Amino acid sequence: MCNMKTVTVREVRQDFKRKVEAPLRRGETLVLRKRDEVLGRIVPEFSKKRVFPDFAARQKEIFGDRIIELNVAEMLRKDRNRF
């Protein structure tokens, strides 16, 4: 329990977003205290960090070694005749 972050009831009331929500989104478990008494633990729903797909590998799988000169924003700008 010494490796877990500690948050007090007062901190939860005053700054929930920074003291509780942000660590939970990062996958951290928090210890909830009131004065010197441990009330419990707040455990995130999913303790693993979000893993995003490898977009570069997926693009290479779809398009191979072909070089795409324009990105989507540039293609739209070209279609709308804007510079």
Image (spheres, rainbow, N blue to C red):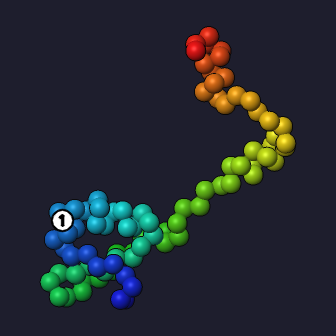
Q: Which quadrant would residue 16 be assigned to in this image?
A: bottom left
Disc 1 is placed on an element classified as helix
Q: Is residue 45 visible?
A: no
Depicted 70 relative to depicted 64: above or below: above
User: How many discs appear?
Assistant: 1
Q: Is residue 64 left or right of residue 13?
A: right
- Amino acid type, mark 1: Arg
Viewer-side residue, 49 vs 73 = 73
> Which residue is drawn at the image coordinates 60% and 19% (left, top)?
77
In the image as oriented, which residue stretches furthest toward the top? 81
The image position of residue 82, as x and y in percent, is 58, 13
Question: Which residue is tagged 1?
Answer: 13
Q: Which quadrant would residue 30 be assigned to in this image?
A: bottom left
Density class for disc 1 (Cα within 10 Å; few <14, some 14-19, many ≥20) is: few
> Which residue is drawn at the image coordinates 85% and 42% (left, top)?
65
Quadrant of the frame with the N terminus: bottom left
> Which residue is drawn at the image coordinates 68% and 54% (left, top)?
54
Depicted 69 relative to depicted 49: above or below: above
The image position of residue 51, as x and y in percent, is 59, 61
Q: Is residue 57 left or right of residue 83?
A: right
In the image as oriented, which residue stretches furthest toward the right? 65
Q: Which quadrant would residue 7 be assigned to in this image?
A: bottom left
Viewer-side residue, 50 vs 76 = 76
The image position of residue 25, as x and y in percent, is 42, 63
> Which residue is drawn at the image coordinates 22% and 62% (left, top)?
15
The image position of residue 81, as x and y in percent, is 62, 10
Q: Is residue 74 left or right of residue 27?
A: right
Quadrant of the frame with the C terminus: top right
Depicted 76 relative to depicted 43: above or below: above
Q: Is residue 35 left or right of residue 47?
A: left
